[in-house]
Amino acid sequence: MTVTRPPPYEWRVYPKSFPRNQWYVAGHAQDFGRTLLSRWILGDPICFYRRVDGTPVALTDRCVHRQMPLTLGKLTGDSVECGYHGIVYGPDGQATKVPSQNPVPPNCRVHRYPVRDRGGLLWIWLGDPDKADESMIPVHPWLDSPDWAIVRGTLHMNARAQLLNENLLDLTHVSFLHADSIGTNEVAETPATTEVRGDTVFVTRPMPSVLCPPLFEKVMGLSGMIDRESVAEYTAPGFHISHVLAKPAGAASDDPRACRHKAVHCVTPETETSAHYFWLIARDYHVDDEAVSQIWQEGTPGVLMQDVDAVEAIERVIAPYEPDYPFEINLRADNGALRARRIIERMIAAEQAG
Amino acid sequence: MTVTRPPPYEWRVYPKSFPRNQWYVAGHAQDFGRTLLSRWILGDPICFYRRVDGTPVALTDRCVHRQMPLTLGKLTGDSVECGYHGIVYGPDGQATKVPSQNPVPPNCRVHRYPVRDRGGLLWIWLGDPDKADESMIPVHPWLDSPDWAIVRGTLHMNARAQLLNENLLDLTHVSFLHADSIGTNEVAETPATTEVRGDTVFVTRPMPSVLCPPLFEKVMGLSGMIDRESVAEYTAPGFHISHVLAKPAGAASDDPRACRHKAVHCVTPETETSAHYFWLIARDYHVDDEAVSQIWQEGTPGVLMQDVDAVEAIERVIAPYEPDYPFEINLRADNGALRARRIIERMIAAEQAG
Amino acid sequence: MTVTRPPPYEWRVYPKSFPRNQWYVAGHAQDFGRTLLSRWILGDPICFYRRVDGTPVALTDRCVHRQMPLTLGKLTGDSVECGYHGIVYGPDGQATKVPSQNPVPPNCRVHRYPVRDRGGLLWIWLGDPDKADESMIPVHPWLDSPDWAIVRGTLHMNARAQLLNENLLDLTHVSFLHADSIGTNEVAETPATTEVRGDTVFVTRPMPSVLCPPLFEKVMGLSGMIDRESVAEYTAPGFHISHVLAKPAGAASDDPRACRHKAVHCVTPETETSAHYFWLIARDYHVDDEAVSQIWQEGTPGVLMQDVDAVEAIERVIAPYEPDYPFEINLRADNGALRARRIIERMIAAEQAG
């Protein structure tokens, strides 16, 4: 998967290819440390580690001499020694030592990807490093505020990333795919409002006076009729927040019983037909209650795996159609997903235009 | 696999592609009931079930909205509810409910395949429904006659269907591949007569006064020298009957000791390089003898697996040649198989001509 | 993989395709006997066995009638009977019996590959049999001399053969990949001399007065400072000898304490991205010492598997680039490998020119 290769089929219908001049989530900040970690992103093998001072580093995970994965080598100080012929690369990707040759050839270097720690996540820029603009990384204070409690985890899926992006933008699926946990009929039956600001899509679904779902009873302590609001916020190309607000029916927004949580879903293409799925749940209620944290920590993967199972099943039925895509129809509920597709289209077109 | 895609290589030599405007066996009638069953046929994922009144239904196993396999949803009455966003499809393939949208868009429908119960098998038409002609389904009264006892089963093979079609049309293999069960030298050494009537090929091999094979001793109660006759009847594209007659040498055809059985082999392409293999053995002797039924029920899969093993081994040695096919020579014993290839060629050509 | 198919990418950079009018090692002579053995070489399935008198035979492992692998049949005397329809092939590849047909059609034959026993190895010629020239097989008297002790084994690798050929021609990897066994820093730091004679490349690396590596202490009984010399000899397309000489530092070459061994590596492409790896260690010291033989027999696979693991890791990171190859740079230590590539290029070009 590269910017220059033409997309393998009509990606305007269903993009598998992704823009590269964008920030993607490479993982939770805590995943990266003083051990070499290999992770493929947008078809690139990448070697991740942290320098002694904690600064994150991302290099192409392929020695430029004979293509050995650097992650099979050794981390020494801030540098990586290739396990094949001992070439040492500094954190800027430039070789500093070639055991069999002196001086080091200047073109003995690997690509260094811009990476940034932001809000407990590590962000990576897959495209032209000169265009990497930190201010494009979405900022959300609650991602690392002491007033919010956070649980997090990582899943993997054998399906193109866009299937999950669109899953998250049409929450009418909650009533059916998650009928046994967070789903209630109201979700599918409540019309949603879609709004686009820049590269961000908002799908808002207010559900006043609905029955409190069992999960909310357990974690929030609410019961009976509640006012529930769900806002899906998608920042292209792969960062989703489900903003959830629940309070006793008729109570004011600043009622002390009002509970807010944010379900963050980071969908990062691994290859054209597989993706990393980094998630976290941040909440502003019962922040110090370990039992509530445990419910979210242990219960969330099961719910999200229902989505992963669905998109993997879909990937299996559409894969034989490559390079075509089976005919499909759109519903009004797909408005958010369709707007999201157009943003990705625009991003790719802008890159191809140069 | 579609009619319109040009075949990937010279299929006249060895057809992998198959005609679609034909009836194929989708399975034993008893396989289908009030549970959603997914089965791929000719490259199409298909969702099978029976209506409350028992009528069989076959729909594309892919929701037209977001491609979710319908078999992961729920059967409710005569309808299927998609497990993703809750769209309900009636047995004609038309959506009757879209939870997030009212009225239902008229193009919210999936393909309904014509299906028919005939002789204990379920038949499916993969092509243009308007051309589905029930009278083309082969009729054989003994398939559901109380005077015949039947055992049946299902195998799967990772090899192109045509390899098994041709296996069944050149029974000289019986002497070698099945040397330890039904094979005797006489089969290979007896010249066969080939006759074509319409889309059906008959290969007749009379073996007067041959030694009774061990299996026939056990199930028929014959021994010593017998008159044995085997007629392979192939109805294109994938329905085979091995008509077997055995009687004491010199006895008349209507001698009460004469035993007849029919080994039915239904070869249905799953993908271009895999197939379903539905089989049954119908016999007119010892019809109520459970011990004889048990011998056929338990012994047949082992014999047929020798054929499956052979065609899978062949698939593995020819697969690297794609899109070509390795050179091969034909023998006189291949006459039936070659006539069968020509029928399939003619069927495909007729479809492509429109 | 055939000579006539154009190579799938710029093989001058990194040949996956190989010349066919060459001798390749098919295995250790002892691998072949009175049992049918299937082995794929350069993309061809081959059926190996020995005649009653021990002469080796190699036939295409695919019956010319219906492509059944002959190795699933039976060896009877000097002939093979196909397990499908009983065709019997003599050791020259010509069918001598077709059970269903008399006389045997003259074109009922499979390809017979020229094979030769030489030095405990079986050599096979994959190209035009008329061009098979025995004198092209490399001759090394110590391969079957009673004055040398030999241990041997076989590995398999899921990587293109050329990756291992080049591994063996740049022994600077020994210091890093085999740091825990035979590697010492001197190997990488000692400049090597490359010389080409005909289709053979020699890379010589003298290491006077270096510390005896632990393995050499155990098998040779040397210790302290030694003079070590390593000569990598590569005979295209896939036969490598690492000539190793070790003696006490300053001793003469004919000093009785001098120890010589030859590590022979035979790299035979199986498919375009997998290979057989036949190895042997021949030594002229402690020839009758079973304990030393055991050290080599049991210890060698572990060292060689480090190379196999490396080239398989490389194959995985370059495979997604097909049909391209990722950019790589060459070092002075790659001189031998680059000369080897040019020999293979020349061989392929000569074949294509006719």
Image: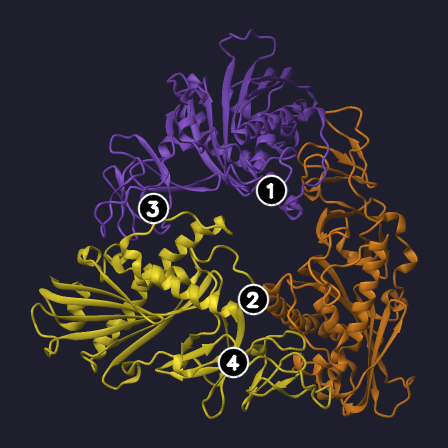
Chain colours: A purple, B orange, C yellow
Say which amino acid is labelled 3.
Leu
Give the crowd class for mark 1: few <14, some 14-19, many >=20 residues within 10 Å.
some
Give the crowd class for mark 3: few <14, some 14-19, many >=20 residues within 10 Å.
many
Say which amino acid is labelled 1.
Pro
CB within 8 Å, label 2 to label 1: no
Q: Distance from label 3 to label 1 (Cα)?
A: 30 Å
Say which amino acid is labelled 2.
Thr
- Left or right: C235 in relation to B180: left
Q: Distance from label 2 to label 4 (Cα)?
A: 16 Å
Q: Distance from label 1 to label 4 (Cα)?
A: 43 Å
Q: What label sits on residue C4 in the rendered view?
A: 2
Give the crowd class for mark 2: few <14, some 14-19, many >=20 residues within 10 Å.
few
Give the residue pinned by disc 4.
C129
Q: Distance from label 3 to label 2 (Cα)?
A: 37 Å
Q: The residue tagged with tag 4: helix, strand or loop?
A: helix
CB within 8 Å, label 4 to label 3: no
Give the residue pinned by disc 1.
A8
Foreground mark, 3 or 1? 1
Q: The residue tagged with tag 3: helix, strand or loop?
A: helix
Q: Residue at x 65, y 48 (%)?
A: A320
Foreground mark, 1 or 4? 4
Measured as percent of width and height from the top left, residue C201 is found at 31, 68
